[in-house]
Amino acid sequence: MSFAPKPMKFYGLHDIEKLPQLSKLSAGQRFDMKVVSHVLPFRTNSYVVEELIDWDNIPADPIFQLTFMQRGMLKPEHFDKVAAAVKSGDAAKIKAEADAVRMALNPHPAGQMTANVPVMDEEPVAGVQHKYRETCLVFPSSGQTCHAYCTFCFRWPQFVSLDSLKFATDKSMRFQAYLKRHKEVTDVLFTGGDPMVMGIRNLRAYIDPLLGPGFEHLQTIRIGTKSISYWPYRYLTDRDSADVLKLFERIVESGKHLAIMAHFNHWQEMQPAAAHAAIRAIRGTGAQIRTQSPLVKYINDDAGVWARMWTEQVRLGCIPYYMFIERQTGAKAYFAIPLARAYEIYRGAFVQVSGLARTARGPSMSALPGKVAIDGITTINGEKVFALRLIQARNPDWAQRPFFVKYDEKATWLYDLKPALGEKEFFFERELRAMLKKKEEALTAATQAASP
Ligand SMILES: *Cc1c(COP(=O)(O)O)cnc(C)c1O
């Protein structure tokens, strides 16, 4: 099947009154949407609006919830303050109120700005997070936006006007020197934002050097992207689509694995023919597509939705990889699902599908010590517990050791949980404290060296 070239139209805060589809909502609902969009980044596009959302099913439609802001995403007291500022029409006041609310939304959870940033030659390496030995995250400065923004995005500070909250590589590309030196790194994950918003020249500038000498230890180039869902034409009809696919082929020909870490939240994103064609085109280059998603209320908090999503992914040749618990940031209170329920949804989906669709691990929390999976709910010596396990850990030796915490029906994150079976703290905590202290000292020393 061939597709006619499509120009993309972005829609933001100032299009809320103009989009014909939104005339179905009341003026009050559109006002609410605008208030929230002053705080959390709102962007959608013509493909999402025209081909993914079922406008006969709003506001319940999962893709509507995925890209359009809802009043409940802000706490009532936050909402009221920003709403008053918006009514006043005073731009400076709106910005001040919005910024104050943003700072109250835990913009960088799990130590992302401190504990994960590596230091090289007494200087932090801009735009890099290195938490797990084998895998380094790189945030290309020109890839820090997306074709549309997810309402639940845990990296929302990347897209708002508070510069101090942003995270990206600098022009010197020191990340390359860092990777060259760190032979223990096998995987580089380009992430964002969405690296696939970059044009071919920027993509090559980031990726090409890693295919050359000095980087033989890198086995896998990963690209984290939502583009197959939000703009499949990236691989079909954009001006540089053919060049992007050629670059993918070149990565594979260089002897490295190319893993497209595709973000899908709902099977509805995988229905359009354009999405199927994009998946075929990417797989045709020799790349693999692995899929991941957080579990979020109003969007995919249903075992049947996950079972169908994983099954359709397998049919299209994609490999289900992770189910995440939504992080402690942004509109978390709106989307949160108790861990006990998350586990039941995961298990409920798992038992419905074939072995090939059971490759998604989870439900997993990306927390300070690592990725913590909920393996089960059980009773030991009369005490009801969650069985937990680190899938990934700051110290690789912490992984795959079962540990138990008191069952808590309401808990939504690791920090709500207490050790069970008479333990005082989790087995990794003393060592984690020492690691974080050391890390902080290195960063402080680097900051002092930088400002004599
Ligand atoms: C999930 C994650 C990775 C990748 O872990 P894998 O289990 O190898 O996919 C790397 N760094 C961070 C910070 C992560 O959260």
Image (cartoon, helix red, strand yellow):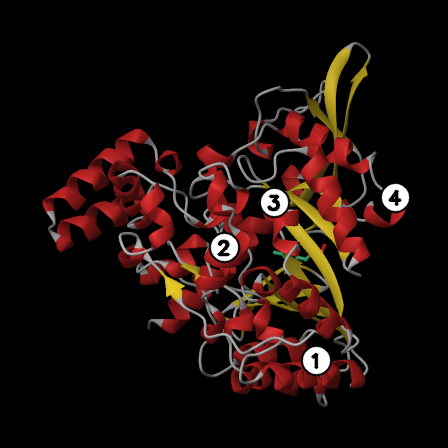
Dot 4 corresponds to which residue? 354
Question: Going by the image, does 368 lie left or right of 451?
Answer: right
| Circle 1/circle 4 CB separation < 8 Å | no
Q: Distance between the residues labelled 1 and 2?
A: 38 Å
Q: Is mark 2 on a helix, strand or loop?
A: helix
Q: What element carries label 1?
A: helix
Task: Looking at the picture, tell me which residue is in the foreground, 437 or 98.
Answer: 98
Dot 3 corresponds to which residue? 294
In the image, residue 186 lies at what x, y percent? Answer: 75, 70
Task: Looking at the picture, tell me which residue is in the foreground, 213 or 373.
Answer: 373
In the image, residue 51 lies at what x, y percent? Answer: 53, 57
In the image, residue 449 lies at what x, y percent? Answer: 41, 71
Q: Quarter-wise, where is residue 73 in the image?
A: top left
Dot 2 corresponds to which residue? 440
Q: What residue type is labelled 3?
A: Pro
Q: Which amino acid does label 4 sit on?
A: Ser
Tell me the residue at 74%/75% (across/down). 218
| Circle 4/circle 2 CB separation < 8 Å | no
Q: Can residue 184 be seen in this view?
A: no
Foreground: disc 4 or disc 2: 4
Which numbered disc, 3 or 2, marks the residue that appears first in the sequence? 3
Foreground: disc 1 or disc 4: 4
Tell me the residue at 82%/35% (across/down). 352
The number of numbered discs placed on residues in the rendered structure image is 4
Q: Which amino acid does label 2 sit on?
A: Glu
Which numbered disc, 1 or 4, marks the residue that appears first in the sequence? 1
Placement of 350 over or under 179, stated as above or below: above
